Image: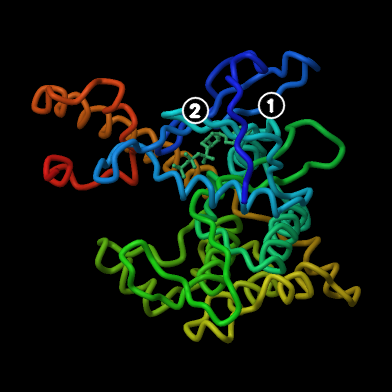
Amino acid sequence: MAVFKSDIVEDLYEIGEVLGSGHFGQVKKVRERATGTSWAGKFLKIRRKGGSLLGMDRTSVEREVEILQALKHPNIVMLKDVFESRSEMVLVLELISGGELFDFIAEKDNLLETEAIQFMKQILEGLRFMHSNSIAHFDLKPENIMLSEKVSPQLNVKLIDFGLAYRFHQGEEYKSTSGTPQYVGKCVIKLSIGVITYILLSGMSPFQGDTDEETLRNVVAVHYEFEDHYFKTTSSMAKDFIQKLLVKDSRERMTAEECLLHPWIKPITRKQVANRNRSSINMRNFKRFNAKRKWKMSYNMVSVCNRLVNMRLVCKHRSDTDLLQVSPSRCLPFEQLFDR
Ligand code: ATP
């Protein structure tokens, strides 16, 4: 059971600038008064009434904390302390200053596959460690893959945001929030690694269709292709790696452990080494993908702000501060906010 300190966080830490925002709060830079060390404080609003839609459920934060406490690994963000007040919980985390990995890559003029592999390897090391502790991340996406620092001899990848992570018990299946059992977990994570690798190498999304329905159909059928135009500079080993992750039968997908042993990650022969060294990622297209991704993120944020402005006009009985706890992408359909 996680121990939450009841001290006032401001007494021990000086609160600084906002580093990022999540669904139920903000992450701010904090400075420990006793040592002068900088950390990242994740401030989460807690739901006060059972029926309320605003703020986070206390047990979800407890789960995130319990999971972070179990995960001490160089490629996973480290949790230092946890504080609790009546309406808020604060997670004091290791400060990650290098920004998102995808943004770092997008700033480069070119990137060899061997360099991309160094990043993939670290992501896989983090995932392997999680899985060996029966934990699945469930929210592996570019926004949650960061770099500890931008300039360092060895760039260190850090996986963040364990808000949706789940601990599996032997023989148990994951239950979604709707209560429907779903055979997801590690299988979905494996699919995410395949998708992330595909995007990293080509700047394309593997299942993208012309409409949302088509995209969904492609995901369900695990239907994708390696279009020559986008994969001109990709090695055959990289394609093989992706093909062993993006397979319909989830039991056939490589585990993180198997990924780390695949010749694309761990070449054995000279030919395999040479094959990787000659290949590079499609930087022009990757930059385009990343710019579009950033644009979509800010578009979502703007549309949420617009919704909130509208809500203030319609929903005067709620306080402004309450409204601001409503999260962007986990935002319920607009109509549902008025149901209760
Ligand atoms: P979401 O609701 O999207 O799941 P969240 O509320 O769980 O998000 P995080 O994803 O953990 O919050 O953090 C939000 C943002 O804050 C991140 O995208 C990142 O930019 C920044 N951030 C999170 N943790 C750290 C950290 N340890 N160091 C630096 N920045 C961080």
254 on left or right of 288: right
- Please identify, in this view, whether the residue under mark 2 or under mark 1 is nearer the observer: 2
Residue 58 placement: quadrant = top left
- Residue 297 point in image, percent of width and height: 40, 38
Left or right: where 61 falls relative to 323: right
Eyeballing the image, is 309 above or below 130?
above
Q: Residue at x 70, y 34 (%)?
A: 94
Describe the element under mark 1 as helix, strand or loop. Answer: strand
Q: Residue 336 location, x and y as percent?
A: 15, 46
Relative depth, front residue between 1 and 272: 1
- The kind of residue on which mark 1 rests is Trp
Q: Position of residue 48 (x, y in %)?
A: 33, 36
**276 above or below 252?**
above
Instruction: Give me the disc on residue 85.
Output: 2
Measure the alpha-carbon separation of dots 2 and 1. 19 Å
Q: Amino acid at mark 2?
A: Ser
Look at the numbered disc 1 and say if its residue's Cβ is closer than 8 Å to ligand 1. yes
Q: Give the number of the disc on residue 39.
A: 1
Q: Is residue 59 left or right of residue 39?
A: left
In percent of the image, x 71 and y 57: which residue is there?
A: 126
Quadrant of picture, ligand 1: top right
Q: Residue at x 38, y 33 (%)?
A: 298
Q: Is residue 299 visible?
A: yes
Question: Image point 87% across, 37% down: which residue?
Answer: 153
Classify residue 32 as left or right of residue 203: right
Q: Is residue 144 above or below residue 189?
A: above
Indicate the position of residue 184 as horizontal and vertical percent values. 47, 73
Given residues 71 and 220, the one toward you in this image is: 71
Choose the circle earlier in sequence order: 2 or 1: 1
